[in-house]
Image: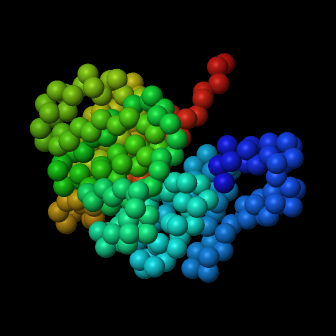
Amino acid sequence: MRRDQLLELLRGVAAGDISPDAAHERVARLPYLDLGVARLDLDRELRSGLPEVVFAQGKSDDELVRIVEAMVADAGRVLVTRAEPAAAEALSAAIPDGCFEPRARVWSAGRFGPPSGRRVAVLSAGTSDFPVAEEAAACTEWLGHEVERIRDVGVAGIQRALDSIDSLRRADVAVVVAGMDGALPTVVAGLVPCPVVAVPTSVGYGASFEGLAPLLTMLTACAPGIAVVNIDNGFGAAALAHRILSTSIASP
């Protein structure tokens, strides 16, 4: 249940349009909705500001459709990550107005909210990092923020990133996705005033240890103002960027 839905329900009770028993029936589901295959945390947005997002990997198509249909029925929108084409096809058959981004492996219906007017730059160090960067970009857009994609600007050809410096400096948050040596977030954080969310990827040769090497590089970055999410976690980067953008900083 979204905050606006709860307020509408309470106003309906106050106006006499909704009986207390009907309101109780609705609110009684708030702890979770038990579907048997999953227990949906429908009030997560009320607690944390972000709704539950469906991780498609490991779920059967039937399970995924049941979960997503219930979430759309409750809130009118849903975001599904790590959706393969067959799963996305099943979801779109059940919910025709859904949208699938194949490179990002993101399926969604509706939007989280109106456009925020805030801007996120999503950089990918190499073309091989692009799927993770697209997950971050697609999720950020679903959350209501403008995204500028800056692709293939790794440190082996740093002039490519420097060519985008004006765009970077206009961003409210920069999400920087890199595998191999994972050095790009440090470079970006040394050039821009905004927070940098670093995303290590599992792209690279053997000594990158499936993303461990860039993860450690990003964690030990000498430039301040970098937050690091887990390997290949484009959604986590989008969620962190959203929290940064939607949280007001109190004046001293």
Relative to 6, residue 192 above or below: above
At 31% from the left edge and 40% from the top edge, which residue is drawn? 122
Q: Residue, x 43% and y 37% (percent of image)?
A: 145
Q: Residue at x 53, y 70 (%)?
A: 67
Q: Residue furthest top?
A: 252
Along the line of sight, the residue nearer the viewer: 239 or 201 = 239
Residue that sits furthest to the front in the current view: 17
Whole-percent x, y for residue 137 in the image: 34, 45
Can you say whether 230 is above or below 13 in the image?
Answer: below
Q: Is residue 220 visible?
A: no
Q: Looking at the image, is 101 positioned above or below residue 143?
A: below
Q: Quadrant of the C terminus?
A: top right
Image coordinates for residue 146, horizontal then vertical, percent: 38, 35
The way the protein has been coloured in the rendering is rainbow
Is 152 placed above or below 207 here?
A: above
Which quadrant is home to the N terminus?
Answer: bottom right
> How many discs mark residues in the rendered view?
0
Could you tell me which residue is drawn at 20 percent across and 59 percent down?
204
Q: Relative to 244, is 186 on the left or the right?
A: left
Q: Is residue 122 visible?
A: yes
Q: Nearer the viewer, residue 193 or 116?
A: 116
Q: Nearer the viewer, residue 197 or 110?
A: 110
The spot of residue 226 in percent (x, y) is 41, 39
Q: Quadrant of residue 103?
A: bottom left
Res 37 → quadrant: bottom right
Q: 234 or 137: which is nearer to us?
A: 137
Tell me where residue 56 appears, x and y as whole percent.
42, 69
